[in-house]
Amino acid sequence: MAVVATKQYQLLTPESAISLASELSLFPNTAKLTCEEIGDGNLNYVFLITDQTSGSGVIIKQALPYAKVIGESWPLTLKRAKIEASALKKHGEYAADLVPKVYETDENLAITVMEDLSHLTIVREGLIKGESYPKLSTDIGNYLALTLYHTSDFALHPFEKKALVIEFSNPELCKITEDLIFTDPFFDHETNDFEPALQVEVEAIWNNKLLKLEVAKLKRSFLTEAEALLHGDLHTGSVFASEVETKVIDPEFAFYGPIGFDIGLFLANLIVQSITREGKQRDVIHGHIRNTWTTFSTKFAGFLEQSEFDSFKDIEGYNAFLLEKIFHDSLGFAGCELIRRTIGLAHVKDLDNIENEKKRILLKKQTLKTGERLIVSRQEIDSIDAVIELLGEIIYEYSIID
Ligand code: SR1
Ligand code: MG
């Protein structure tokens, strides 16, 4: 619903965000409102507005007309605010407990007003501190199965599905992914950002023709396979959680793409955590890696058997073929995410905040090697346990070199 449709776009400040909250009657007249800008992402402002009287709050998220992480030299469409709110609502139809509730949206101001999640923590931050979030992988596995199945041709009439493909056309944000995940890290491109100590490994990536052939295939899949409504940027910074609750936020990159993309991005960000941990702490993450895939694949396979629109669902071998394809695609996309988070434009704190330089470089080399192996060998990796074994092999290999 457009709530303040006559307003021209203007950047909100904590003060004007409070005025907007009052104007929108988000709180009772007696409320004593305070506001804090809490966004730590690359692109947007996030204002938390709290009524100090009742303790209740709302989030107002505002898209900036440029990438916050770069500045005004990188203009960015404001339409992404509408895509994000629409994706939250569409995914919320199927996974209501796993996404924030949207209260209001306004296209002119590029804002989404949504449920306050400040009692939860950003999973990336928590994992870095050693938290484990017991429900994380079951919740994300379910979120993936629910959102990806129910927005696909398996669950929707072809007309309804194709209307959604049009509604969620998101060319500008897709272009960012096409460049930053699938292209730039594999060439000597100005957006890349890596430590000089990785020069040899980076040049080996740029010169690896087999790797680039496989990345080209994965990029083609991203460009052309409109399978389901993806979140589009499902890393651990896009998830809020506690011990008992999980919420997936920030689907501004949502579009119709290959099912394995969301799964791969999430697995990759868990893999980064595995690489930075040791001993039992690693096992916790391996449990999440295994359980994300197992929960997703079990639930998705069950849905496929019930599909209303897939005439071939009872043909022996077809559903297994679909699951295998999704698995291998996921591993390839995970590999691209691992490489771009290490040498591309947008890094992750899990690796960059490791103070000891020798350790940080070693872990980055392991991340690059894992990415490469997942991309190149994805068709030969036949189970999620084999992924975990591969991780163990690479870490062992590199600890010897060191
Ligand atoms: C300029 S945007 C860089 C990255 O931030 C977003 O969260 C996406 O992951 C994008 O690739
Ligand atoms: Mg984001």
Image (tube, helix red, strand yellow):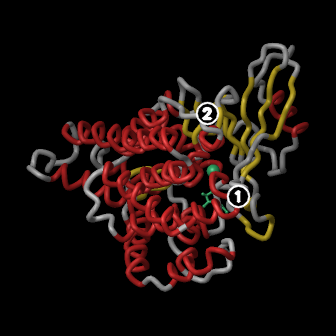
Question: Compared to 187, does 61 lie above or below?
Answer: above
All told, the count of numbered labels is 2
Residue at far left of view: 316
Residue at 66 percent across and 71 percent down: it is 194
Residue 27 in which image quadrant: top right
Q: Residue furthest right?
A: 15
In the displayed structure, 366 sits above or below 235; it is below
To which residue does mark 2 refer?
102
- What residue is rendered at 38% in x and 56% in y? 330
Q: Quadrant of residue 35?
A: top right
Relative image position of residue 32 (x, y in whole percent): 88, 19
Q: Is residue 296 left or right of residue 109?
A: left
Residue 182: give x, y in percent of width and height. 50, 70
**In the rendered image of this protein, does residue 357 appear above or below residue 202?**
above
Identify the residue shown where x is 63% and y is 65%: 361
Residue 182 visible here: yes
Residue topped by disc 1: 356
Type of amino acid under label 2:
Val
Q: Nearer the viewer, residue 129 or 119?
A: 129
**Quadrant holding ligand 1?**
bottom right
- Type of residue at label 1? Asn
- Verify CB contact (< 8 Å) between mark 1 and mark 2: no
**Residue placed at 41% from the left, 55% from the top?**
392
Badge 2: few (under 14), some or many (20 or more) residues near its Cα, within 10 Å? some
